Amino acid sequence: MTEELSAREISRMYRDYINPDLARVMRITGLGSVEDHAQGCWVWDNNGQKYLDMAGGYGVFCVGHSHPHVIEAIEKQLKKISLSSKLFFTEAQAKLAKKLAEITPGDLQYTFFCNSGTEAVEGALKIARLVTNRITFVAMNNAFHGKSTGGLAVSGRPNYRVPFEPLMPEVRHIPFGDIKALEEAVDDTVAAVIVEPVQGEGGIHVAPEGYLQAIRRVCDEHSTLFIADEVQTGFGRTGKMFAVEHWNVCPDILLVAKALSGGVIPIGAFIGTPKVWSAFKGRPLIHTSTFGGSPLACTAGLATLEVYEQEDLCHKSATSGAYLKEGLDRLALKYPDLIVEARGLGLLLGIETVKEEYAGAIISEMARRHIMAVYTLNQPKVIRFEPSLNIKREELDLCLQSLDESLAKTREMFKEK
Ligand code: PLP
């Protein structure tokens, strides 16, 4: 970059060269600033203003922004080799795959590395088809699995799906949490059931007690695979390393992305059992990725997992999550005319507002108070809170204080209308 541009100029360039409507939406949601640098839970704009990041990149910044341990590791790696030649073995990839086999539940063992959540979904759907020799999937209403065509086919919001139909055929959508609907939908033709243990973009819905165990049982009865999409819930977000551990179940394929590389470089992966990996037998190149598993991304992944151990981040997520949830519950009681309820697990929390327009107003008021918050993609009535897992108590208090003020202001605004 040669010259520094103002926020106005950059916003105009978004309008003229990227996406005019997106530029408009970004301006009216209240921030409209240009990010300059970030550290821990804080982001600075190019005017030197700082913002508390309670959106956490929708699950990316579990260790915080620019964690020094991750940065140091990738700076070292950058000087050696960053992307793979693909003809040699990559040490960091081998080490990260072994580490993932150690920390994931049950007999999950093999990892395929890619670069995003939706790529992990695509790969898992393909492998499930290969290994079962079936083409039907069962997915959840309201689910979010990304915006590639396979990811969209199993996602649950018609707004995003319908304009691209026909998508992958033979997807049966069922209500999330409904065991009877699950039992009716899964039969011997179903390759896999795909589910998020906590629906993130769907509005922060935690799987009801017994639901994931029921999926495991029904899948076993029909030799169907269980795919757990932990792209957002993975790596401590819900207070355990993986959300499925809350219910002691083990999927056949686990999908991860977002937090794995410490918020520094894109990564995604799907991890499967030896049985699932038989799909690659005799055809190791049936599914590939040029950039997936690069030395740089895998080095970031290894350093990130070291931070989890050094800082006990899963435990912090559980305790800070409980503290924040208590605060959100208090505000839900104080503002019953604005908030339906607070819900979530660990530091994947949300408040459901009574009306979509309240959520927009609250988010704008919080932005004015320099708190970054955002609604969930499939449910704009829900404002999510998913900050870094090492967020401090005083930062959580600051968020709650600003939310309280924003709710009071929103109540006033709508009373006047
Ligand atoms: N799966 C889940 C559960 C997600 O929350 C997301 C993104 O929010 C995705 C898949 C898609 O990930 P990406 O945006 O990296 O493609």
Image (cartoon, helix red, strand yellow):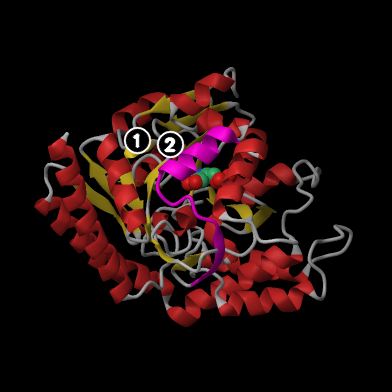
* Rendered residue at 72%/70% (across/down): 92
> Residue 389's image quarter?
bottom left
Q: Which amino acid does label 2 sit on?
A: Ala
Q: Which residue is drawn at 26% across and 61% down?
A: 402
Label 2 near ligand 1 (CB < 8 Å): yes
Q: Which quadrant of the rendered structure holds the C terminus?
A: top left
Q: Nearer the observer, disc 1 or disc 2?
A: 2
Does 18 sit above or below residue 34? above
The percent position of residue 362, horizontal first and vertical second, equals 28, 48
Within 10 angstroms of label 1, few (less than 14), some, or many (20 or more) residues?
A: many
| Badge 1 vs badge 2, beta-carbon distance below 8 Å | yes
> Whole-percent x and y of residue 288?
76, 46
**Residue labelled 1 has its Cβ within 8 Å of some atom of ligand 1:** no
Q: What element carries label 1?
A: loop
Residue 366: which quarter of the image?
A: bottom left
What residue did someone put label 2 on? 143
Q: Where 398 sits versus 354, above or below? A: below
x, y (%) of residue 133? 64, 30
Q: Give me the residue at 42% from left, 73% from top.
A: 313
Q: How far apart are marks 1 and 2 (CA)?
A: 8 Å
The secondary element bearing badge 2 is classed as loop
Q: Which of 189 and 373 is in front in this view?
A: 373
The residue sitting at 59% across, 22% down in the picture is 167
> Residue 251: x and y, percent?
48, 49
**Residue 209 visible in image:** no
Residue 224 shown left or right of residue 213 in the figure: right
Instruction: Specify whether residue 101 is painted magenta.
Output: no
Q: In the rendered structure, which disc, 1 or 2, sits on the residue that comes first in sequence?
A: 2
Q: What stretch is highlighted in magenta?
A: 19-39
Asked if residue 402 lies left or right of residue 130, the reply is left
> Of 78 and 363, which appears nearest the observer?
363
Please give the residue where the numbered disc 1 appears in the rendered image: 176
